[in-house]
Image (cartoon, rainbow, N blue to C red):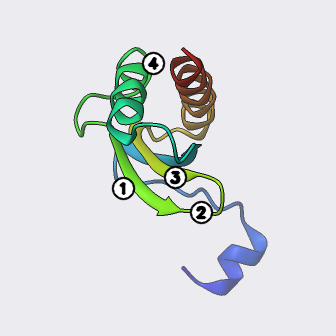
Amino acid sequence: IPNSDIYTRAVTVRTAYPKRRSEYDVGIGYGDDIEDARRAILDALAGVDGVVDDPAPEAIPWALDGSTVNIRVRWWSASKRADVVRVHGRVIASVKAALTR
């Protein structure tokens, strides 16, 4: 794209793919069971509107921080920005509820 087009015209960014991966790190206590937390997170993601099944969501033990064991939660949704944001919010609410239970 010529620089003059970027400075003088509106630029629309389009993804090459219809799905977009998002991620969020969730901290659990050192006394909590990682596999139980992973199962609860994945079960929570299965019920979230907008999270696609293929590729499947993931919950990966990621880091040992000062007071938490972090689990990286990854999921795919439609790539339209509004969809990504809405699904992200639903994922966070669902995961929080599942881990509280």
Please tell me which residue is depicted at 38% across the width and 41% down the height of the picture.
34
Of the two numbered discs 2 and 1 on the same chain, state the one appearing first in sequence.
1
Horizontal placement of 57 versus 67: left or right? left
Circle 1 packing at 10 Å, graded few (<14), some (14-19), many (20+), is few
Disc 1 marks a residue whose amino acid type is Ala
- Which of the numbered marks, if any, corresponds to residue 48? 4
Rendering coords of residue 79 (x, y %): 46, 41
- Percent across and percent down for residue 88 are 58, 34
Which element carries disc 2, helix, strand or loop?
loop
Q: Which of marks 4 and 3 is nearer the N terminus?
A: 4
Q: Looking at this view, is 44 or 90 the one in front? A: 44
Q: Which residue is drawn at 37% across and 35% down?
A: 38
Quadrant assignment for the C terminus: top right
Q: Residue 16 carries which label?
A: 1
Mark 2 vs mark 4: which is more N-terminal? Answer: 4
Q: Is residue 99 above or below residue 64?
A: above
Whole-Å distance between the Cαs marked 2 and 3? 6 Å
Kind of residue sitting beneath label 3: Val
* Helix, strand or loop for disc 4: loop
Quick check: can you spot residue 18?
no
The quadrant holding residue 90 is top right
Residue 11: x and y in percent read 65, 62
Q: Are marks 4 and 3 in contact (CB under 8 Å)?
A: no
Q: Residue 65 carries which label?
A: 2
| Residue occupying image coordinates x 76% and y 76% | 7
In 3D space, how far apart are the residues under numbered discs 1 and 3 (Cα atoms)?
A: 35 Å
Query: What is the secondary structure assignment of the residue under circle 1?
Result: loop
Amino acid type for the residue under numbered disc 4: Val
> How many other residues sit within 10 Å of disc 2, few (<14), some (14-19) or many (≥20)?
few
Are the two marked residues, 4 and 1, in contact with CB atoms closer than 8 angstroms? no
Q: Where does label 3 land, which residue?
A: 69
